[in-house]
Structure formats: C-alpha cells, structure tokens
C-alpha cells in the first residue's frame, strides 16, 4: 500500500532536517516549471494564486532564485495542517525508511515526491490555471504523475493507493491509474457528522503517521486507525471509501 498526501503552502526552511535529501524523480520538470514561472510578474502571480502582493513578491523571488536555492527533504519542509498531524520530526528512523517506500507527496511543481526527496522553496498549487503551453497545470503533467505512482505500486507490490490527498491534487491522478489499482479514499468526520477542514487535514497527516509507525502492509488493517479519538465507521463506509468519525 502507498498513501498519498497533498503538499502544504507553508514551508519550514529553518529547522535542520535529520536526514539528507534524496534525488527527486521530476527535478528536471520542476526546474522547467520554475523557469517558466520566473517570467510571471508579481501582479500575475497574485492573480493566479489569489495571494497578497507581499506573498507574490516572495514567490517571484523564489522562482527567480530557484536554480541556486538549497534543497531540503520534502517531509521536513512542508509545514501545513496535514504535516502538523504527521509530525515528521518525531518519527524514528525505521518509520522514515518505511515512509520512503510507502508514502508519496503530490506536488504542483515536483509532481510526485518521496518523503526524503529534495525540494527547493516554491508555491504552485496543482489547481493553478497556468502552465507552459497549457491551460492548467494538470494538463501539463498529463499522465506522468499517475504513471510514476503506478510504477512505484508495481515495485511495492500491493496495487493499492490510500488516498489522503485533497481533490485538487488527486485530480492529477484520478482516472489515469491502471484499472487493476485499488484506490481507497478516506473521509474524516466529527462525532455529529460535520466535515471540518482543519481537523480533516490534520487527520490525514495522523493517518499517514499511523501507517508508517505501525509499518502497515495490509490495506484493511488501516481500519484500526484510532489517533485523536477517530474510529472506523463501518455503517458509513464502503469497500473503497472509508469514513472515520471522531469521538465527541
């Protein structure tokens, strides 16, 4: 089983990572996209990403300096709600090694990252309506991300994806995997059935952590996930769409 997560908009660029970066599969593609994005004006970046002028300047500078920026392992660089739940800094070495084989991070710039793959600072959401010679970033990536994930699944051997990504990022994969691949989607709810985005994002990270800490090999064993009061809701779940409800 391979679990997939979305990236984060916020980055930790100061905390020393406990492991060195490994080579990213799509480093050349990331460099191509960053070079093309470096020609976008701050105003255009602000419009595309719906961000403030200050953030637009920060990201324009990042694209301009991309080729010379230092690389950091993705697992210790993404720093949003999902990664608060994952809490990578407290994972032991065995869990990190397992994550390298069983966890993938989707990325608008890097396509598909293993946890320790090196990345440079950027912000480019998968849903961005821009790409070199394309209308959308998902069009630019085409089948490459799904093909890479399918290749990793073939090596890993289970043929199952645990989808913990947002729909924006899953759009780069959906409908592009071989028919033989099983995809299990996960829905996190409150005790009263409400969906609260912050809690759901954090839960996705916690589930990824639970997977790599327990070295889970059999997909259905993930139904035992119980972090932060969550429990599997059999009545609200199907074979390939699971609901976890958090205790009141």
Image: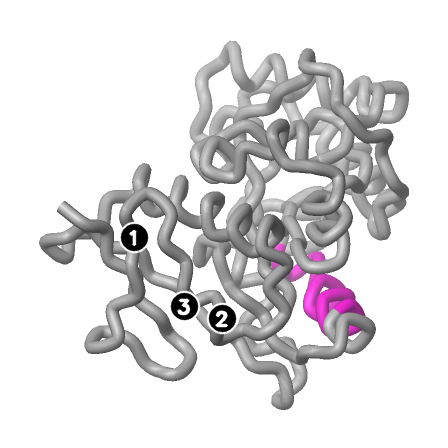
Q: In what element is the residue under mark 3?
A: helix
Magenta region, residue range: 138-152
Give the residue at x 66% y 28%.
Answer: 77
Give the residue at x 32% y 37%.
Answer: 198
Work out how far the residue at label 2 is from the one at label 1, CA to CA, in angstroms. 15 Å
Give the residue at x 64% y 46%.
Answer: 108
Which residue is disc 2 drawn over?
221
For the residues bearing labels 2 and 1, Cβ distance under 8 angstroms? no
Q: Earlier in the sequence, mark 2 or mark 1?
A: 2
In the image, taking residue 23 as reference, residue 62 lies left or right, namely: left
Q: In what element is the residue under mark 2?
A: helix
For the residues bearing labels 2 and 3, Cβ distance under 8 angstroms? yes
Q: How crowded is mark 1: few (under 14 residues within 10 Å), some or many (20 or more)?
A: many
Work out how far the residue at label 1 is from the one at label 3, CA to CA, in angstroms. 10 Å
- The image quarter in which residue 142 lies: bottom right
Give the residue at x 83% y 26%.
Answer: 71
Can residue 87 be seen by looking at this rendering? yes
Which residue is disc 3 drawn over?
223
Image mark for residue 129 = none
Residue 211 appears at what percent x and percent y?
Answer: 56, 56
Determine if the magenta segment contains residue 146: yes
Q: Main secondary structure of the magenta part?
A: helix
Residue that extends furthest to the bottom in the rendered view of this protein? 180
In the image, taking residue 146 as reference, residue 43 lies left or right, namely: left
Q: In this view of the protein, which residue sits in the foreground, 245 or 66?
A: 245
Image mark for residue 230 = 1
Q: How crowded is mark 2: few (under 14 residues within 10 Å), some or many (20 or more)?
A: few
Q: In this view, does 157 lie above or below 68?
A: below
Can residue 135 be seen by looking at this rendering? no
Q: In what element is the residue under mark 1?
A: strand
């Amino acid at each position: 089983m391979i679990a997939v997560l979305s990236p984060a908009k916020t980055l930790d660029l100061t905390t020393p990572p406990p492991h060195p970066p490994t080579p990213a599969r799509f480093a050349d593609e990331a460099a191509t996209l960053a070079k093309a994005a470096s020609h976008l004006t701050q105003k255009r970046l602000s419009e595309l990403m719906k961000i403030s002028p200050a953030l637009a300047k920060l990201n324009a500078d990042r694209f301009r300096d991309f080729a010379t920026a230092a690389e950091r392992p993705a697992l210790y660089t993404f720093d949003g709600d999902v990664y608060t739940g994952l809490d990578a800094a407290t994972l032991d070495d065995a869990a990190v090694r397992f994550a390298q084989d069983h966890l993938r991070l989707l990325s608008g710039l890097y396509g598909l990252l293993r946890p320790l793959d090196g990345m440079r600072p950027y912000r480019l959401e998968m849903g961005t309506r821009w790409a070199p010679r394309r209308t959308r970033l998902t069009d630019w990536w085409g089948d490459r991300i799904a093909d890479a994930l399918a290749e990793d699944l073939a090596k890993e051997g289970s043929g199952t994806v645990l989808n913990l990504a947002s729909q924006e990022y899953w759009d780069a994969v959906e409908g592009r995997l071989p028919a033989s691949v099983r995809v299990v989607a996960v829905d996190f709810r409150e005790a009263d059935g409400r969906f609260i985005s912050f809690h759901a994002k954090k839960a996705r990270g916690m589930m990824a952590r639970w997977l790599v800490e327990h070295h889970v090999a059999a997909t259905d064993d993930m139904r035992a996930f119980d972090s932060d009061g969550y429990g599997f809701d059999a009545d609200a779940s199907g074979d390939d769409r699971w609901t976890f409800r958090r205790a009141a």
